[in-house]
Image (cartoon, helix red, strand yellow):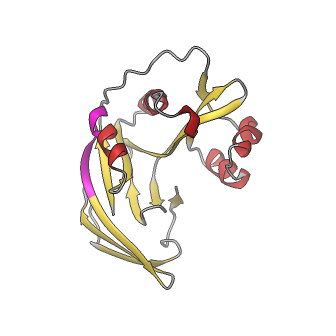
Amino acid sequence: HTFLVSGQELKLQPRDYRNYEIRRASLDDIDRVRREGVREAVFRERMQRGDHCVLVLKEDRVVAWSWSATGRLFVASGGITIDTGDDGFFLYNVYTAPEERLKGFVLICFKKQLEHNHARGCRNILGTISAFNTESLRTHLRMGFRICGETFGVTVAGVSFCYYKSWPFQGRRLHVFCRLPAGDIKTV
């Protein structure tokens, strides 16, 4: 059970993070993110296809990150297909190390994502949140996101079903596929 959220301008008031470095990731960060459990192949693929990653570092350790992508996307965690169009981008894989949580790193990561994507002409912000993650949903709504879609998904014997209860994009209400949807689509 997943919600699609969208926004245009967000209410982001990040703190001053004096002992942290906040910057765009590069392929030179492979060893840093691997130490935090990110598979090298996944990081490399995302970087090479043009996804944008913001890192928060404390000394030389990555303690938080956020990714964004554009185009036709398959959101594996919900079995959802999204097309950001020419003026949108999708925020995904937001993470903060447990000992660094509640410091507001999501705000600075989102701010940097918005700056990057707005400079490219992408103003429509999209993201997905599990319906069971009520704290994240509340946080996103406070930032200025609104719920614009809802899906239900299940996988049985390797066959995935995704029902789009409400969805802002044209398409079928029921999507059935094995493993990944067909076509030219990036998995996030």
The reply to whether the magenta stretch includes residue 38 is no
Residue 123 shown left or right of residue 32 in the figure: left
Residue name at image x 49 percent, y 62 percent: 76
Marker count (numbered)? 0
**Residue 53 makes an appearance in the image:** no
- Report which quarter residue 110 is drawn in: top left
> Which quadrant is home to the N terminus?
bottom left
Q: Is residue 62 above or below residue 174?
A: above
The residue closer to the viewer here, 164 or 18, is 18
- 99 or 149, which lies in front? 99
Residue at 45%, 57% (x, y): give it.
Answer: 72
Q: Residue at x 33, y 38 (%)?
A: 139
Task: Name the foreground residue: 101 vs 141.
Answer: 101
Q: Which quadrant of the figure has residue 114?
A: top left
Residue 78: image location, x then y, percent: 42, 63
Q: In this view, does 56 lie to the left or right of 36?
A: left
User: Where residue 165 appears, x then y in whole percent?
Assistant: 23, 66
* Residue 153 rendering spot, x and y as whole percentages: 37, 70
Q: Horizontal and vertical percent for residue 65?
A: 56, 37
Above/below status of 58 relative to 144: above
Residue 145 magenta-highlighted: yes
Q: Is residue 45 visible?
A: yes
Q: Give the range drawn in magenta.
A: 141-149
